[in-house]
Image (tube, rainbow, N blue to C red):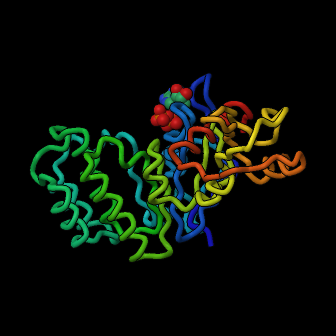
Amino acid sequence: MHTLTCRNVVRKMGDDFTLGPINLEIPAGTITAVIGNNGAGKTTLFQALSGDYPGKGETNILGHNIHSVEAKAAFSYVPQTFPEVLPFRLQQLRDLHAAHDDSWQDDRFQAFVHEFKLPLRKRINKLSVGMQRKTVLALQLSRDTSLLLLDEPFAGLDMEGQTQLEKMLLHKMEEDPNCSIVFATHIADEVGRLADYIVMMKDGKTREPMEKDSLAQQFKRIWLAKSVTGVEEAPGIQKVSIEGALPQILTNDAEATEKWLAARDAQIMKRESLSLHESLPLLLRDEETNGV
Ligand SMILES: Nc1ncnc2c1ncn2[C@@H]1O[C@H](COP(=O)(O)OP(=O)(O)OP(=O)(O)O)[C@@H](O)[C@H]1O
């Protein structure tokens, strides 16, 4: 079952940038990290997924069109900027949700207020940028919804806040195993700790979601017993260097590289998977080279 489906979603932004066409399916019970370099279109994608745009194509949440009342009730959205809440006080927004929002969970809200130490009676535009984000996270995550769309939710949070948010998101998944979370991030550690899937963006387009764990199989560092002629041209090769006396290669397609090496009787001394800190930038660089 899919929590969110997108069919041929296209949004033109001025003369220079077009989002899509986006075709995307987010399975129930999964966490997906959307990654991409600055300007790749992540925020524009989140605006499109939330129905916050006049564009083409169709987005459904739990089978309901994004513009329907049913769909609106089924997801929470934390955008990158939120000018509409700034003039209010958190208490006023809490009262509004408590009175009119069937999905509102006040005990969860009180827990957020306590954890994030949120002031209820101060105008939100008088809070620091990080506190403003915590405020909007508290409001949106206190709604009992099946899909969380979070555009860079960790940006601007202090270290304690990042850890708290991470715990809250994992707790939400435990409480509601059919819930889905889609979040944009530039932080490899958050991808590592939270995501099941990674969706990569470049030039307004998304690639097929890939399993995070598959990256460790694909991206490897391999040490060879001696130099192999033409190894720079082997499939998947990202970099060839000498470490100590041993030639070292980085590959984004370990299986194909090792097949190529085996055909030349090259001896492998050691191999290790790359951390996400190393593999994600290579993945994004690869996109720059190969296109999507
Ligand atoms: N209102 C607008 N009018 C015209 N172009 C826009 C508008 N808003 C965004 N864009 C363009 O859309 C493109 C994608 O921007 P977007 O903010 O979605 O990227 P992003 O991946 O979220 O970037 P970042 O990682 O820096 O947050 C950029 O080239 C940007 O200039």
Which residue is rendered at x = 76% and y = 42% of the image? 236
Which residue is rendered at x = 63% and y = 54% of the image? 215
Q: Could you say where residue 235 lies in the image, as x and y percent from the top left?
A: 81, 42
Which residue is rendered at x = 90% and y = 49% of the image? 263
Furthest-left residue in view? 121
- Name which quarter of the figure residue 202 lies in: top right
Looking at the picture, tell me which residue is in the foreground, 7 or 113.
113
The answer to whether residue 254 of the structure is visible from this angle is: yes
Q: Could you say where residue 2 lies in the image, as x and y percent from the top left?
A: 61, 68
- Name which quarter of the figure residue 35 lies in: top right
- Name which quarter of the figure residue 209 lies in: bottom right
Which residue is rendered at x = 56% and y = 66% of the image? 3
Q: Could you say where residue 177 lies in the image, as x and y percent from the top left?
A: 47, 76
Looking at the picture, tell me which residue is in the foreground, 18 or 213.
213
Q: Could you say where residue 219 lies in the image, as x and y percent from the top left?
A: 65, 49
Rendered view: 110 above or below 7: below
Furthest-top residue in view? 15
Rendered view: 231 above or below 171: above
Q: Quadrant of the N terminus?
A: bottom right
Furthest-front residue in view? 245
Q: Indicate left or right for 183 with 126 as reference.
A: right
Q: Quadrant of the C terminus?
A: top right
